Amino acid sequence: MSQDNNQEQFSLYYETGKIALERGDYRFSIENLEKAIELIGAGSIRGGEAQIWLVTAYQAGGQPEEAIALCEKLTAHPHSRIRDKAKDVLYIMKAPRLERPSEWMVEIPDLASTESSNPQYFTTKPRKSNKIKRNRVVPEVDLSQVDTKDNQFIGVALIVIVLTLGSLFFLQ
C-alpha cells in the first residue's frame, strides 16, 4: 500500500510541477518536481523524466548553473532515453548565445508609469459603409424588346448527355 501511495503522491507532485512550469510559476514548479523525485527515486525512468522537467524549470527560473549540473548528471542515467534527452538539452544549454540586432527587438513600454486616472481616448477613421446606395437607379427593361426565341440549348444538352451515358453503358 505504501508503494501505491508513493506512486500517487509522485504523480500529484509531478503533474503539479509540470502545470506550474507551463504557467510560468517556476519556483512552485521546482518545489513540486523536487518532491516528486524524492518520492520515486532519481534512477527510475519516471524519476528521470521528472528531472528533465526540473532542468527546464531551473533554466526558466534563472538558475542555469543548477540546470547544467543536473543535466550533466543525467547524461549518466541508467535509462538510455533519459541519457539521450539529457545530452540534447545539455547541448542546447551550452550553445553560445547569439547577439540579436536591435531592430529585431520590440520595446514594450512600462504601463505602470502611466497615470491610470487620466484615461486617453483615441478616435479612428469611420469605416466605409457596405450598405447599398439608395440613390442608384435601376433602368427598367421593356419586355417587348427582349428576344424570347427558343435557342434549343436544353434539347441539345439533353441529347449530348444521353449519347455520353449510352456510350459509357455500351463500352462497359
Image: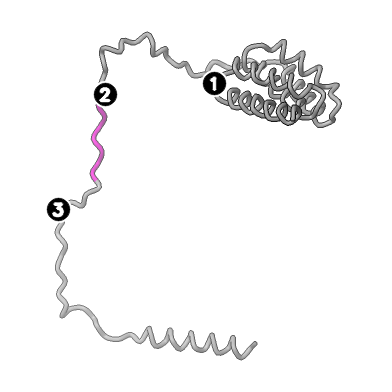
Image: 112 above or below 133: above
Q: CA distance from mark 1 to mark 2?
A: 28 Å
Asked if the stretch drawn in magenta spans residue 10, the answer is: no
Start-end of magenta stretch: 123-129
Numbered tag placed on residue 122 in the rendering? 2
Residue 34 or residue 58, whichever sits in front: 34
The secondary structure making up most of the magenta span is loop
The residue lying toward the viewer, choosing from 17 and 116, is 17
Instruction: Provide residue 77's location: percent of width, then percent of height.
Output: 84, 23
Horizontal arrangement in the rendering, residue 157 relative to residue 36 (left or right): left
For mark 3, give the secondary structure: loop
Q: How many marks?
A: 3
Task: State which tag comes first along the sequence, 1 or 2.
Answer: 1
Q: Amino acid at mark 3?
A: Arg
**Amino acid beneath label 2:** Phe
Q: Secondary structure at mark 1?
A: helix
Q: Residues within 10 Å of mark 1 (few under 14, many from 20)?
A: few
In the rendered image, which residue does mark 1 sit on? 104
Is there a contact, CB below 8 Å, between mark 1 and mark 3?
Answer: no
| Badge 2 element | loop
> Which residue corresponds to mark 3?
134
On screen, residue 92 versus residue 127, left or right, reads right
The numbered mark, 1 or 3, whose residue comes first in the sequence reads 1
- At x 84%, y 30%, the residue is 80
